[in-house]
Amino acid sequence: MALLAGLLAAQSTGTASQPSIDIALRARSLQPGELVVVGLALDRDATTVEVTAFERTSPAYPVGPGRWEALVGIDLEQAAGEYVLRASADGGARAGERPFAVVAKTFAERTLKVNPDFVNPPKAALARIQEESRFLQALYAAPAPRRLWEAPFRRPVPHRANSRFGVRSVFNGERRSPHAGTDFLSPAGTPIRAPNAGRVVAARDLYFSGNTVIIDHGLGLFSQLAHMSRIDVAEGDPVTAGQVVGLVGATGRVTGAHLHWGLRAGAARVDALSLLALLAKDPP
């Protein structure tokens, strides 16, 4: 799919006394579940640059003299409508903004049969589920403050995605939360490789996602690799791009062996394939 270019590359606006920041947006589309790479051009270098959209602030990272980038996610349940992205350098010494529109997207629906305990968990599991929810909330709220990745991103497994991100799931006849990840129909035992460098912030068995590894790539970007048969890293470990972190399995709420790759950019749940389309050496 061709990336939006001319439509999204636009001059930002500033004030007469305040130099502007030129802002360009790069994405597959401006729809729910998409990652957006924000390009920022400054007339001179800066110490810090950040962007704000959807009431969330994301730090930018330098990519060249006077050039910065930031990753902004459009959450899979973000409402369609008109929004404004704002950029600021060195605490507001330079600023700019540009309007953009999120276009509505209709996600498909899927019906699955799973173990009833993963649809309506028994009372004995509720305390565990609540504790895991608190653990994940705290984890995502404290990302590494600097970029930990360098190389282009890569697929964690060589197989194609078999399940569309964002589908509305009906388990055993009951509607549940939308699918916040991309599934790859990889055979059990397939090595799972880190999509890029970062630090392992979770490596444990979780009730719904089974054996799970979560990698903090820095600046609010997280990869969740779930349903593993085996975990090969420990919490706190640094990982490099392509490092094996575990094996494909069928643990947690599944109907068969596969890899679930969930991606978060800030608080937004986005399709991992949108990241690969923008920041991979060999886009899917």
Image (cartoon, grey):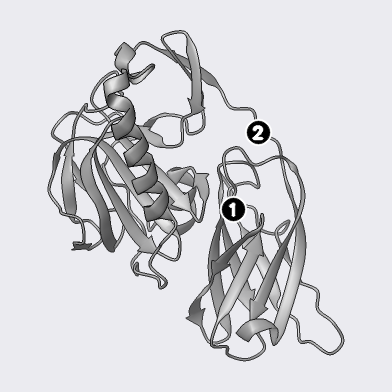
Q: Which amino acid is tagged 1?
A: Ala
Residue 57, image x and y in percent? 59, 64
Residue 67, image x and y in percent? 56, 80
**Residue toward you, 142 or 239:** 142
Q: Rate crowding at label 2 as few (under 14), some (14 to 19) or many (20 or more) other CA atoms within 10 Å.
A: some
Q: Quadrant of residue 46?
A: bottom right
Q: Is residue 114 above or below residue 192?
A: above
Q: Which mark is residue 27?
A: 1
- Identify which residue is drawn at 31% across, 17% down: 122
Please indicate, yes or no, whether residue 5 appears anywhere in the rendered image: yes
Q: Which mark is residue 200?
A: none
* Quadrant of the drawing holding the N terminus: top right
Q: Quadrant of residue 36?
A: bottom right
* Residue tagged 2: 105
- Identify which residue is drawn at 27% across, 29% down: 258
* Disc 1, SS: loop
* Quadrant of the drawing holding the C terminus: top left
Please indicate, yes or no, whether residue 283 appears anywhere in the rendered image: no
- Identify which residue is drawn at 33% across, 12% down: 116
Tell which circle, 1 or 2, labels the residue nearer the N-terminal end: 1
Whether residue 86 sits left or right of residue 252 in the image: it is right
How many numbered discs, if any? 2
Q: Rate crowding at label 1 as few (under 14), some (14 to 19) or many (20 or more) other CA atoms within 10 Å.
A: many
